[in-house]
Image: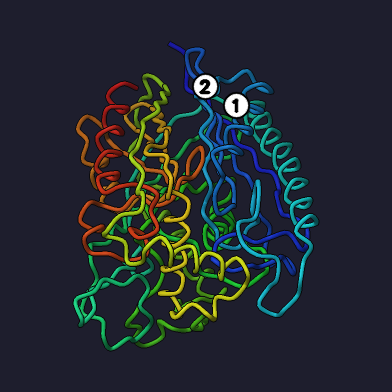
């Protein structure tokens, strides 16, 4: 039996100015760079099996772009397509890929030619393909004999459930800081940080962290990799001869907003256009907290023998959420709001802050699925590294999905990873559809999708 080998690589994917920025239901175009975006790659090899885990500082990959990049990596390296695990950190200050779904005039009134914007995105997609392939090839070239350890830590007071029950009985997502109508959060937080450590012969130690929380802390129109990049860079500064990767977890209903801040909780923050508190300084704080959590277990990981590595991918047909009587608006109103939104006239839609985002998202979903399809194929991926499992989910699962997968028996650690090998939106838990809120009203899928992902994810873990 051969020894486990691990390799690391990092490439820069910072985009050009003026490219469309992804993450909100309003146009933004890059006006500068706060910090660089990167692709980080981990290559693993044992007994003739090679797997690649890549993660990019982007909001998401479309399924089309993910397939294109995975195919390019497979052709360039010889690693099977299914053994390429491609994830996005979900920063909300990274560029669109494939196409921009918003308008061509920013909030300052600056107008951009749609053909020019699409040209920049096309050029960026080509650049991204080269850089992802480079990272994959260099990680394989960097393979060294390694031993693996793991541990679980906790990042306290930086991740919060973002859905709340209000005094009128409704459920609202991001209802605003210090909103007196908030009764309590709906759900529980999972602040666990999964940590893997690969000690290599004659090379840097590779550290992988997995933690679930939205990287939507910076805002604005300047490119930033948000707090996951702060974590990586802070840890590498603190511990010599280390390289870090971060894979986001089940963050669909989890973000950084403390709606009842006390003492210095609101330092370096401001209330943004959608009622969400943001600030670059707070992203720095969150990255440092995650780095500190990893440090708590770094020297005390449990080293284990990795008997085998493996991968498996499956496709599941998921029922879509077509227009129905449970929607808050009818089809005609949805088309009206969609037209206003695409014309840059959100001010004429009778909602504001996060409720405006919610109603626009619901309208776009209704219009998209007015005539079907009834099902969308969705790929799920599982990687095995000894007794540690990674489950790649192509969208944004709720924290309940994480709990369902982590409770699977027979594993020392289970790492759910969002936005892997594409993105098809939110995966709320069943009861969330009855409660309402942004995620359920915008989700492309019918109630039961989260529970189905748990079921299929557990089957994959058994299979791998």
Q: Is residue 242 above or below residue 226?
A: above
Q: Residue 192 carries which label?
A: none
Q: Mark 2 points at which residue?
A: 45
The residue located at (64%, 54%) in the rendering is 96
In the image, taking residue 365 as reference, residue 93 lies left or right, namely right
User: In which image quadrant can residue 157 be found?
Assistant: bottom left
Q: Which of 179 and 282 is in front in this view?
A: 179
Question: What is the crowding at mark 1: few (fewer than 14 residues within 10 Å), some, or many (at least 20)?
Answer: many
Query: Element under label 2?
Result: strand
Percent across and percent down for residue 390 are 38, 36
Position of 436 with respect to 200 (left or right) is: left
Residue annotated with mark 1: 143
User: x and y percent of residue 243 in the render?
Assistant: 57, 45
* Residue 100 or residue 461, whichever sits in front: 100
Residue 73 or residue 264, whichever sits in front:
73
Q: Which residue is drawn at 39% across and 53% down?
A: 211
**Number of numbered discs:** 2
| Distance Cα–Cα, label 1 vs label 2 | 8 Å
Task: Check whether the beta carbons of the residues at disc 1 and disc 2 lie within 8 A of each other.
Answer: yes
Question: Which mark sits nearer the N-terminus, 1 or 2?
Answer: 2
Give the SS element for disc 1: loop
Residue placed at 75% from the left, 59% from the top? 114
């Amino acid at each position: 039996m051969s020894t486990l080998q691990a390799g690391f690589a990092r490439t820069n994917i910072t985009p050009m100015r003026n490219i469309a920025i992804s993450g909100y239901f309003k146009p933004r175009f890059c006006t500068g760079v706060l910090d660089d975006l990167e692709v980080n790659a981990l290559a693993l090899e044992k007994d003739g099996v090679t797997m690649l885990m890549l993660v990019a500082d982007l909001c998401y990959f479309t399924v089309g772009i993910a397939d294109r990049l995975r195919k390019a990596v497979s052709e360039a390296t010889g690693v099977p397509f299914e053994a390429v695990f491609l994830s996005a950190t979900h920063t909300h200050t990274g560029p669109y890929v494939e196409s921009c779904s918003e308008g061509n005039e920013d909030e300052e009134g600056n107008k951009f030619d749609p053909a020019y914007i699409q040209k920049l995105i096309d050029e960026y997609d080509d650049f991204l393909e080269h850089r992802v392939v480079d990272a994959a090839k260099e990680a394989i070239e960097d393979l060294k004999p390694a031993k693996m350890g793991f541990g679980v830590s906790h990042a306290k007071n930086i991740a919060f459930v973002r859905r709340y029950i209000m005094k009128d009985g409704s459920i609202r997502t991001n209802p605003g800081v210090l909103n007196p109508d908030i009764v309590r959060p709906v759900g529980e937080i999972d602040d666990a940080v999964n940590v893997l450590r690969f000690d290599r012969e004659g090379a840097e130690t590779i550290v992988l962290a997995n933690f679930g929380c939205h990287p939507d802390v910076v805002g604005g129109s300047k490119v930033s990799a948000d707090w996951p990049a702060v974590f990586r860079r802070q840890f590498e500064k603190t511990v010599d001869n280390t390289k870090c990767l971060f894979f986001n977890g089940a963050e669909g209903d989890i973000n950084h907003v403390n709606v009842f801040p006390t003492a210095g909780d609101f330092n370096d923050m401001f209330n943004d256009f959608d009622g969400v508190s943001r600030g670059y300084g707070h992203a720095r704080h969150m990255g440092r907290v995650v780095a500190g959590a990893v440090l708590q277990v770094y020297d005390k990981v449990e080293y284990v023998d990795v008997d085998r590595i493996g991968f498996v991918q499956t496709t599941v047909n998921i029922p879509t959420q077509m227009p129905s009587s449970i929607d808050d608006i009818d089809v005609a109103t949805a088309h009206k709001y969609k037209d206003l939104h695409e014309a840059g006239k959100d001010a004429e839609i009778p909602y504001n802050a996060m409720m405006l985002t919610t109603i626009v998202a619901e309208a776009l979903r209704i219009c998209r699925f007015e005539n079907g399809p009834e099902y969308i194929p969705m790929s799920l991926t599982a990687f095995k590294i000894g007794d540690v499992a990674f489950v790649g989910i192509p969208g944004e699962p709720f924290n309940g999905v994480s709990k369902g997968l982590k409770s699977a028996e027979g594993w020392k650690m289970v790492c759910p990873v969002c936005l892997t090998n594409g993105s098809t939106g939110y995966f709320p838990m069943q009861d969330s559809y009855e409660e309402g809120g942004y995620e359920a009203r915008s989700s492309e899928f019918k109630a039961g999708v989260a529970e189905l992902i748990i079921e299929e994810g557990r089957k994959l873990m058994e299979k791998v």
